[in-house]
Amino acid sequence: MIIRRLAEVPSVDWGNGLSRRFLLDSDGMGYTVTDTVVSAGTKSLLEYKHHLEACYCISGSGEVVDMAGDSHPITPGTLYALDQHDAHWLIAHPAEDLRLVCVFTPALRGDERHSLNGAHSSHY
């Protein structure tokens, strides 16, 4: 059995916020669970070429915008899943952080970070 508390898990500055990673590849579960904060007012072009990801909003607000330009509001109680390795913009509201519980499969190693230069999607 694995028991972890937020104060005990590794925190990674992922590029536009903080990712607290509860389960990693080394735990042998096959998936990662994170508590991720997206900093207020940030806009991140992301793509996971080697992972599928689902995110559930627990506080704050923002939007996820697909590459066709379709915007989907994110508020507490909203889940979005990147089931096709979808490139997307993740945008946090200018006045508040966006907080998400995210699940990645396969699991992350734990040291992954984004390279957010705006010209190309950041991926791992």
Image (cartoon, rainbow, N blue to C red):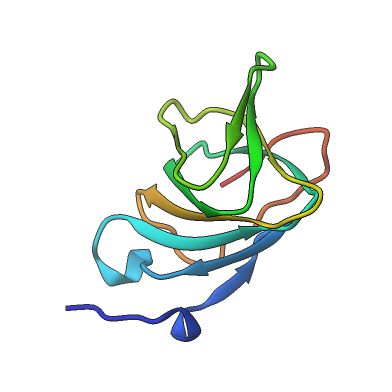
Residue 19 position, x and y percent, is 57, 64
Q: Nearer the viewer, residue 109 or 44?
A: 44
Q: Nearer the viewer, residue 75 or 34?
A: 75
The residue under the point 74% across, 45% down is 93
Q: Is residue 9 left or right of residue 38?
A: left
Residue 15 visible from this viewpoint:
no
The residue under the point 32% across, 55% down is 31
Q: Is residue 51 left or right of residue 44?
A: left
Residue 52 position, x and y percent, is 41, 39
The residue under the point 35% across, 64% down is 25
Q: Is residue 27 left or right of residue 88?
A: left
The residue under the point 49% across, 63% down is 35
Farthest bottom residue?
8
Residue 66 visible from this viewpoint:
yes
Quarter occupied by residue 101: bottom left
In this rendering, the answer to whether 102 lies above or below 83 is below
In this rendering, the answer to whether 11 lies above or below 66 is below
Farthest top residue?
68
Farthest left residue?
1
For the N terminus, the quadrant is bottom left
